[in-house]
Image: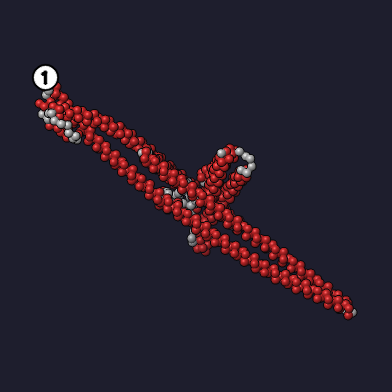
Amino acid sequence: MEAEKQLKFFHGCVAAAFAERDHSIMEAEKAKEEEEVISKKLQESQKRVEELTSDFLEEKKLTATLQIDLEEQKRQNEIFRKVINKFYEIRQHSLKGFLEDTSWEVKCECLLHDSADTWSFNDHGETSTSKYINALEEEVEMLRKSVDNLQTKLQMGLEIENHLKKKVRELEKKNILSQETIKKGISGLHHYHSQHRVHIMNLLDEGSSHLKSIVNVVEEKISQLHILSRRGMVLAYQTLWLVGTGDASEALAQALQEKVAALLLLSQQEERHLLERNVNAALQKKMEELQRNLLQVTNEKVKALMELAQMKQEYQLLQEKISQEIKQGKLLADIGGKRIFQERDGKLKNLLKKTYLRRWIGTLDPNGDEAEAHLNYEGNAANRRTNYSLDFARMKIENATLKESLESMERLTSSVRRLRLSLIKVKESTTSECTVTSMSETLDDIYTEANLVKTALCSSLPVSWSAEAGVRSSSDESFDKETIDVGDSGNENVDFVSAAGFEMVEILMLAAQILKDHITKSGSRNGS
């Protein structure tokens, strides 16, 4: 019977393993299908981006040709204006009238309303003048058509200008929003610093009160030791008196017993004193550690404020650059390029959405207690075995994630420590007679190495990340929402190891840049 039960148990384990294998194969096929769908969508979006860029280039060429035509028409209009002024002067001289400062349209009307006899200078040249007048009328008609064409082109230019103004307003709104976010970040940093400062001050107060209580206890113990020493002296005098009376043996035994008890009590008091000394030393170390933490928090706040000032400076430079590009007429091309880059960046972020591997495993059965109550039935036993296999797989995945996080944190701390020590060496070498060029080269090497670490952190993906965002059918709506709202950082969870490493590397790069600027300034001062 036991062999049959074991055989049935092994058969059930084999069936569960096959079911788990089939489930994983189906999940892999679904993942491949969705990967193909996403790749098709990516190709279509790339084609769309290429079409938009080609349309933009065609529009740019069209505007250039329109500007060339406009300049040509202006040149022709100037020539026609000179011709009409010349004919108007001839007309006024022939009529023996004085020259009036009239407009160009009035001169054209006067020349058109004149009769053909006015321009007949002799009988033989009558046909030639009529032909000339007809040619002038044709040229005037052509000029009117060109003026209409130029007006339409001017209207198109005004529409383009309005579109650019609208884009400038949108950019100004974005700048205002970014300023508000920066202000909120600064207020958050101030609040965070105040909270940590209050917490550390409370810890220091508690430590000082605890130390005072320990000192009071030690003083009480010392007073008790003095009292015990006095009692020992009294007992010694009593033993001497008993010896003098003749009861020497009993007095000596009693004195020895009391001496042993006093020695034991003294040893206990010394042990307590040593223990209290160790406690005081530990509390002193704790206070020093808290002070170091407070100093570190203040230094981090200073570094964050320096980074914020640098960001503000970059933001001002970016505003000046945008204003210059608006003046030069290059804003439209830059906006198109930024949109293309943002779309590509958004698609890349969408492909790298964080999806925890429990989607590949499934959730636990909420009716697990009821299943345990009915273990005698074969169906519930099979469900329970599948749940156990899922739990085992989940534990494996979480263990692998934790191991990878620990390994990456160790590598990151070793790299950051090495870079920090090299920065400290460069800072200490500033006091010696090292050249400015060697120190700047060392700082450049440190900066490039930190940049490589930053690139590795940005491009690395942990085990708990997946390239697919929708494995189950119930997550299709959330996948659509994520693809629509790519820029919302609240919808995606950042890996804590990568985030911490990114911040540490940024701080190291900032420190290297500041040290390099300081070294160059000091070198220029010494050279001058």
Q: Which residue: 51% across, 51% down?
A: 304
Q: Nearer the viewer, residue 311 or 35?
A: 311
Count of all numbered marks drawn on residues in the image: 1
**Above or below for 296 versus 137:** below
Residue pushed farthest bottom?
245
**Above or below for 128 versus 328:** above
**Residue 187 coordinates in the image, percent (x, y):** 47, 56
- In which image quadrant can residue 134 be found? top left
Q: Amino acid at mark 1?
A: His
User: Which residue was labeled with disc 1?
Assistant: 124
Q: Which residue: 11% across, 21% down?
A: 122
**Residue 423 coordinates in the image, percent (x, y):** 59, 45
Residue 228 visible somewhere in the drawing: yes
**Above or below for 485 versus 270:** above
Residue 258 visible somewhere in the drawing: no
Q: Nearer the viewer, residue 373 or 321?
A: 321
Q: Secondary structure at mark 1?
A: loop
**Above or below for 325 versus 209:** above
Q: Which residue: 88% across, 77% down?
A: 243
Left or right of 498, for residue 344: left
- In which image quadrant can residue 253 be found? bottom right
Q: Nearer the viewer, residue 160 or 117?
A: 117
Figure colour scheme: secondary structure
Q: Where's the C terminus, which quadrant? A: top right
Q: Nearer the viewer, residue 103 or 17?
A: 103
